[in-house]
Image (cartoon, helix red, strand yellow):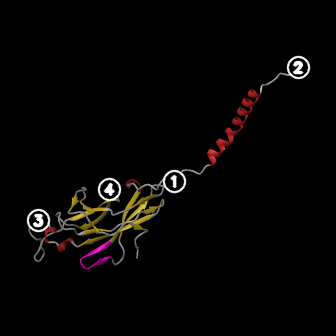
Amino acid sequence: MHLPVISPRRLAGAAAIACAAALIPVASLAATASPAAPAASTPACATSGLVVWLNVPPGNAYAGGAYYNLEFTNLSGQACTLRGYPGVSAVSLSGQQIGSPAGWGTAKTAAVRLASGATAHAELQVGDPGNYGQCFLPGPPPRPGRPGMLPTAAGLLVYPPGQFTSKVVPYPLNACARSGPVWMSAGPLQKGNGELG
C-alpha cells in the first residue's frame, strides 16, 4: 500500500487553518464577556414627564408675603435629573403673563437625580404686590383708603430648569399689574419634597 506524501508546507498551512478555526469561538466569547461601555449619564427631566404642583406649608405667611414649595415629581417611568432654577410667572386664565417673572438668587446649584416617582422642590417666595404702588390696576380706587385693585392671577406658569416648555400650576393669587417690580423669587432645585408641616 502506498500512502500519499504531504509536503511540510501543506501540513503547516492545514495546521494554521485548524488553529484559526478553533480560536474564532474563543475570540467571540471574549468579545461578549468584555466589560460593557460606561452607562450613559442620566438625562435631563423633560417637562412632559413631570407633574408640577404647589405645596403650601402651614404658617407659610410672613409680614409682606408668603413662601411655598414648588414641587417637581418625576412620572416619566425612568430616572432623570434637574439642575438650576425654575422659571416662574403669574398668568391670567387665558395664559397671559402678569407682571415680571420671578427673580433668582445666586446660590450654587447641584444636579438632583430623580428616580421614577421621586420629587424635588424649589422654594418660591411671593411678596405682597400691594407693597408696590405701580402694581395696582389703573382706575379709581374701589373705596377710600385703598390705592386701587390688584389683578388676580389664575396660577403660575412654570418652566422646569433647562426646559423650554412649561406647565401651569392653578393657584389664584394677587399679582402685579405691570412689569418692573420683582415680587416673586424662586430658589434652586433641591432634593426631596418640601416640608409639608
* Rendering coords of residue 87 (x, y %): 30, 61
Residue interval drawn in magenta: 60-67
Residue denoted by label 3: 138
In the rendered structure, which amino acid carries the disc numbered 2? Answer: His
Q: Secondary structure at mark 1?
A: loop
In the rendered structure, which amino acid carries the disc numbered 4? Answer: Ser
Could you say which is closer to the camera, residue 105 or residue 181? 105
Height in image: 34 above or below 99? above
Residue denoted by label 4: 166
Give the label on residue 39, or none: 1
Q: Nearer the viewer, mark 3 or mark 1?
A: 1
Height in image: 33 above or below 149? above
The residue at the point 54 percent across, 50 percent down is: 37
Separation of residues labelled 3 and 1 (CA atoms): 58 Å
Q: How many marks?
A: 4
Q: Nearer the viewer, mark 3 or mark 2?
A: 2
**24 sits left or right of 79 in the view:** right
Separation of residues labelled 2 and 1 (CA atoms): 65 Å
